[in-house]
Amino acid sequence: MTERGMSLKGRDFGRGKGEVKFPTLEEALETVPKIHGHICTASYLGTRMGRLAMKHIKLKRKRDLCVGVEILTCAADGIAAATQCSFGSGRMVFLDHGKFSAIFCNRMTGETVRVRCTPDIDREHIAYGKQLDRFYRSLDKVTMEEALAEKAGLKKIEDVLIEKWDKLSDDEIFAVTKVEINPLDLLYPLDQQYIPDPITCYSCGDIVEKSRTIEKGGDRLCKVCAGEISMKNP
Ligand SMILES: [Zn+2]
Ligand SMILES: [Zn+2]
């Protein structure tokens, strides 16, 4: 049997009806390394943010939940593990607000909560992030041995932070507020999610959503063939 055939055998596809049940914190933290590669400060905090939000939002169906992450960090994967909202599901959008926080919305009822870290946790996390930032910026100036030693030191600081936060209650780490938002702001437009108006690119022959093509000399070209994207079609 092919690898693919094996992988689908005996699987249920998670679409069963019944009560809306999200992963526990433990289950979500077990998922994080599988999708993210490791548990770090931001993915840890994101997991707890997502889990906490699920205690505050009433949902009849999982698919009614959508999330906006207000900064693009490892937290997004923690939130995905806890809420099962992901970029791929179209129910996680990036809101470029520059804040370590996230918005969770029941798009059917409009009920929305925002979870952010308390200022003390934020400052602690930012201070660690600055050390990490210095490390990455210094990489071209140090030897491999120096870099590995520094990285090991940073990993210890990270582990201490996570262990410390793990002993704190949600109230000590986060602030939860009710907010109002248009749920459509947390969903990608449909013509980004599928191809409602397909045409064939005159140059490469790819089928492409018409609204993403460019007309040149009377022909419709995809963005790559029109030279708008720095990628070359073979
Ligand atoms: Zn990470
Ligand atoms: Zn093309």
Image (cartoon, rainbow, N blue to C red):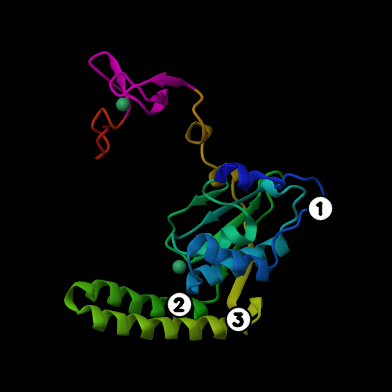
Name the foreground residue: 228 vs 205: 205
Question: Which residue: 73% across, 44% down?
Answer: 15
**Could you give the CA–CA distance between mark 2 and mark 1, rounded to whole angstroms?**
36 Å
Would residue 41 be found to the left or right of residue 148 on screen? right
Would residue 174 be found to the left or right of residue 76 on screen? right
Name the foreground residue: 140 vs 126: 140
Instruction: Quarter of the image for the N terminus: give it.
Output: top right
Question: Which residue: 28% across, 72% down?
Answer: 136
Cβ of mark 3 under 8 A from ligand 1: no
**Could you give the CA–CA distance between mark 2 and mark 3, rounded to whole angstroms?**
14 Å
Q: Which residue is mark 2?
A: 125
The quadrant of the picture showing ligand 1 is bottom left
Question: Which residue: 49% across, 27% down?
Answer: 195
* Label 1 CA crowd tier, 10 Å (few <14, some 14–19, many 20+): few
Residue 138 appears at what percent x and percent y?
A: 23, 76
Stretch of the chain drawn in magenta: 197-222
At label 3, the amino acid type is Asp
Task: Give the label on residue 19, or none.
Answer: 1
Task: Give the label on residue 97, or none.
Answer: none
**Looking at the image, is mark 2 or mark 1 earlier in the sequence?**
1
Task: Give the label on residue 166, or none.
Answer: 3
Q: Secondary structure at mark 2?
A: helix
Instruction: Quarter of the image for the C terminus: give it.
Output: top left
Name the foreground residue: 23 vs 211: 23
State yes or no: residue 43 in magenta.
Answer: no
Q: Secondary structure at mark 1?
A: loop
Question: Which residue: 45% across, 21% down?
Answer: 198
In the rendered image, is residue 194 in sight?
yes
